[in-house]
Amino acid sequence: MPEITPERLFQLLAAPPGASRKGRVGCVVLAGEDAYLRDLSRKGIVAACFPEGAPEWAVVRVSLHDEGLDHILAMAQSYPMLASRQILFALDLEALEELDEAAREVARERLAAYLEDPAPFTVLVLEAASLDQRTKLSKLLAEKAAIVSLDLGDDGPRKTQQSIPVIVEMARRAGVSIELEAAAQLADCLDGGLERIAPEVDKLAAYAGDGKRITSADVAALVPAAKRYSVWQLAEILATGERGRALAFLDSLLREGEEPVLWSARWPGCTGS
């Protein structure tokens, strides 16, 4: 199964457990180090499988380091208690690659046997910081599992661009919407760093109010890292008569190191008081 987007994965998982084998997802691999995307993907998987809320006992998190593959596969093949399906998050997939060669091959064969006929009532989610595409294990998973990349990459422009749809989803979860231009602006301000962006989205959502829309002006006013905005934009905000937004933007400028003493040179007659 080729690498898929989280959104497509959630659509596939939303199918009932008794659906046909074609298109059914029995195993998911979350590959990457981004903590925010990992948490978002976990929540999305649970919501897709249990739209009305998951029973506590139907979502299990275990570690391959601690439990071992055989125990986890046995759990996957055990019927869930008082639930039509279960989700088994198996962390530390790298533990299989750390085994000696003979044990690693046995583990791969056992996983392959399970993936040939995965339990229809279990979504097995394997988590790894990275996958070495050269290994037999990675090739097996590329063929039999749905792989979701949790990394936006190191390339600045690409990372910034890929973070935009994630920001839109962040805003939706915070109860507001965000203009695409504002999402792009926020991504650019913080270099696509989702862990830094997430609290800023929460702050912007509170500023916009429930059910409202985050705009580019809101980002300019409230996000301190938006250093490319200058005191000249403060004049534009003042011209709208939005005093609260102007004060918030002024606070952002000061925290970024703007010198009040320079204002009199830019705006004759301004004393900075």
Image (spheres, rainbow, N blue to C red):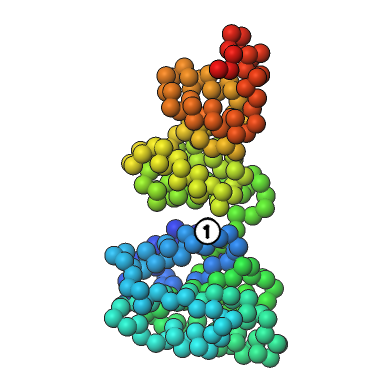
The foreground one among 47 and 4 is 47
Residue 98: which quarter of the image? Answer: bottom right
Q: Residue at x 63, y 14 (%)?
A: 264
Residue 225: which quarter of the image? Answer: top right
Residue 105 to residue 167: above or below: below
Residue farthest to the top, as pictured: 269
Q: Residue at x 59, y 13 (%)?
A: 271
In this rendering, does residue 131 appear at all? yes
Residue 148 to residue 181: above or below: below
Report whether 238 appears left or right of 230. Answer: left
Q: SS class of the residue under badge 1? A: helix
Q: Residue at x 49, y 62 (%)?
A: 39
Q: Residue at x 55, y 60 (%)?
A: 35
Q: Position of residue 156 (x, y in %)?
A: 66, 46
For the residue carrying disc 1, how many other residues have a C-alpha within 10 Å: few (<14), some (14-19), or many (20+)?
Answer: many
Quarter of the image with the C terminus is: top right
Q: Amino acid at mark 1?
A: Leu
In this rendering, does residue 168 appear at all? no
Q: Position of residue 93 (x, y in %)?
A: 59, 76
The foreground one among 215 and 208 is 208
Q: Position of residue 149 (x, y in %)?
A: 56, 62
Find disc 1 in the rendering and name its residue: 37
